[in-house]
Each structure stands twice: as C-alpha cells, then as structure tokens.
Amino acid sequence: MDGIVAKPTGQADERDKPLWAAVVSLSLGVFGLVTAEFLPASLLTPMSADLGVTVGAAGQSVTTTAVVAAIAGPAIVVYTGRFDRRNVLLSLTALLIVSSLIAGFASSLSMLLVARFLLGIGLGGFWALSLALAMRLVPGRLMPRAMAIVMSGVSIATVCAAPVGAWIGATLGWRYAFLLAAAVGIVTFIVQALTVPRLPPIGTTGLDTILNVLKRPAIRLGLATILLVVTGHFAGFTYVRPFLEQVPQFGVEAITAILLAFGIGGFFGNIAGGFLAERSTRLSMMSAAAGVAATTLVLALAGALPAVAIVATAAWGFAFGALPVSVQSFLSRAAGDEAEGAGAATLTTFQIAISTGAILGGLLVELQGPAGVFLFAAVAAMLGTSLVSVYRERALQPAE
C-alpha cells in the first residue's frame, strides 16, 4: 500500500464487483477520441490541398482541439454536475460522431475548425471525467487495472492513428479517415449505452472544489510530476523525427518503423504500469519517470549510434506508456470523493505540459539542435523522479 487511504465519502454506488465491460467501453471512447485528435497529423497535406488553404492554416485544426480541450475539461466537470454521468458520457461520445462527420464532409477551413472545436469539447470532457467514471465502475483495489484498460485506448490510438490515417488518405481520400472515426464513435456509443449503468451525480463540483483539491499535498505532487515529466517528454517527442534524421541519420522508412516500435512499447508500458500500480502507485510513477529520464539521456549522449537510437526510442515509449496510468492511479487514491475535480486539474496540467514542452523544444532545437532537446527532456524527467522521492513522507498522507 502507498499510505494514501482516501475512501470516497459520498460514493453510494461503490461496487463489490467490477463492471469490466463498461470499463472497456471507456477504452473504446478514448481510442476514438484520440484517433480523431491525431488524424490531421498524417493528413495535413491532402486536407490543405483539398480545402485550398496552406498547410499551416490546416494545422490550426490540431491547435483548436488542444486549446478547446484544456478549457472544456474543467467546464464540463463544473457545469454538468447535476446530470447523470452516464448521460454526460454518451453526450461526449456523440460529439465524437458529430465532429467526425462534419470533418468528413467539410467544404471549407471554417467548417473543419467547427468540427475540431466540437471534438475538443468531447475530448476534454471525457479526459476530465474518466478518472471518476472508472472509480465508480470497479472496487477501489482494482482501480489501477481499470485505468490501465482505459489508457490502453490511448496506446492503441497512438500506434494506429497516424499510419492508418495516412494509408486511408492515400488510398481512399482523407475524408474517409474521419468517416471511419465516426464509425468508431457509433460503435462506442452503442457499447456504452449497453454496458454503462446509471451513475447519478454525487454532490457537485465547482471551481472552489477544484481549488480545494489542489490543497492536498499528494495531488500537488502528482500534478507537479506530470508538469515536469510530460513537459520534458513532449519537448523531445515533438522533434523526434528531426533527431532521428539528423543524429543517427535514418531514412523515412526506418523512422516510420522506429516510431511504430515507440508506439508498441507504449502499449506494453501501459499494461506494465497498471500492474505495478496495483502494488504501489508511488513506485510505478517513480519508475516511469525514471525510465523517461534514462532513455532520453541515452538518446542525448549516444543517440548517434543507430542500434542505440532504435533500442532507446522503443524503451522510451515503454517508459512513457507507463506514466499516465501510474499518475492517474496515484491521483485516484489521493482524490477520493473529489475525483472529478482531480480529473479536471489533471487534464489542464497535461495540456499545459504538452504545450510548454512543444514550445521549449522548438526553442532548444534552434539553439542547441535535436540532441539538446533530449538532454532537456532527461533533466526534466529526473527532476520529476526526484520530486516523488524527496516529498515521499509529506505527500503520501491520507487525503482529508
């Protein structure tokens, strides 16, 4: 046990038996949402040509979703607190369907941006609620396993979205990729409607609730770890292709295979992180952060050696794959009865870290080249690892 004993005070529907089918339906939801989020990355060229805009303008479809998701997450938690969470979940999945259909039939950039705006609401709301939803579908002791199942949707989407989107775009046209995302959304909606029980609201979550959650030392520890490690990770990951091109000097086909290995590593890392978190969420979180630090440091110092670059990149994917489920499991124990507030704070922290990492990575690439970015990633992840260790006694106090 980790020392965090936070039993929900108002969770009337705490379960003795896990509802695994409902948990899997959450994984389907995150798979569909993340797939739709990642699709433009592999389709920007045909999208921009078809809509008659520049690649940079089409790229705003990615920015729109990220910005809206960061704002929508806390807003969904606060303003839907009186509604049955099952109905909120189904509404968010419906946004995936509607946004994908609009994108698939978009005739202008503005229409595409509307679609991506709606997707951002669905994505942000789902992420903010996923922690609380999983907590209400399984007994507390199985929470890490449930989060590993939910997060497996992210891992699979990471592996599949870009290559499948590129293949569909090249063979059928980019619009069919979004129509496929809509089909995934329809299947997900049906599965969720059949498996997720009624989940009446338990109290309400306001902005003051989210602020009160942030007063808990363990919550602050988890969020600070996210901020450090995820910022470093995305500083490196955003520029991993230039690194692989310029340092070990791989060709396009080799880079594609290496990134696939990264994604597969992330899938298995997610599973390993879930199992380890069942035994110790703190150890799981610290191990994942240390793994990111070690692998990015190897890339910074010895990434010019092709064999080292290949192995270190795959191991990096494994380490980072274990991080989200580890941190989510850690925060779920600390959050207790305020899981939705903690989920909203987690979502916002992730989005800030992703954006900060991308910005800092861009600056470092210009100043020090790709290798310098990975040195920064290693240092940031090391700080995150140290934070978990140094503040162990203070942070792992029972949530009040």
Image (spheres, rainbow, N blue to C red):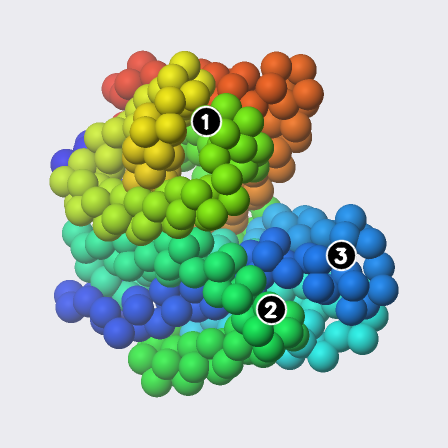
The crowd level at tag 3 (other Cα within 10 Å; few <14, some 14-19, many 20+) is many
Residue 198, picture quadrant:
bottom left
Toward the viewer: 341 or 359?
359
* Residue name at image x 53 percent, y 77 percent: 180
Disc on res. 248: 1
Which is nearer the N-term, disc 1 or disc 2?
A: 2
Q: Is residue 281 left or right of residue 338?
A: left
> Counting other residues with Cα less than 10 Å from the Cα at mark 1, is it few (<14), some (14-19), or many (20 or more)?
some
Q: Secondary structure at mark 3?
A: helix
Report the amino acid beneath label 3.
Answer: Ala
Residue 282, relative to residue 161: is it above or below? above
Can residue 130 be spotted in the picture? no
Amino acid found under the numbered disc labelled 1: Pro
Going by the numbered disc 2, the residue's amino acid type is: Gly
C-alpha span from label 2 to label 3:
15 Å
In this view, the residue in front, 112 or 80, is: 112
The span from disc 3 to disc 1 (Cα, nearest Å) is 31 Å
Q: Position of residue 201 (x, y in %)?
A: 44, 67
Which residue is disc 3 drawn over?
Answer: 58
Image quarter where the C terminus lies is top left
Instruction: Name which residue lies at 51% across and 57% down.
Output: 162
Q: Nearer the viewer, mark 2 or mark 3?
A: 2
User: Callout 2 environment at 10 Å: few (<14), some (14 to 19), or many (20+)?
Assistant: many
Res. 169 mark: 2
Front label number (1 vs 2): 1
Question: Looking at the picture, how far across and down is residue 27, in whole percent?
Answer: 36, 64
Inter-mark Cα distance, 1 to 2: 29 Å
User: Mark 2 or mark 3, which has the lower sequence index?
Assistant: 3
**211 with respect to 295 (left or right):** right
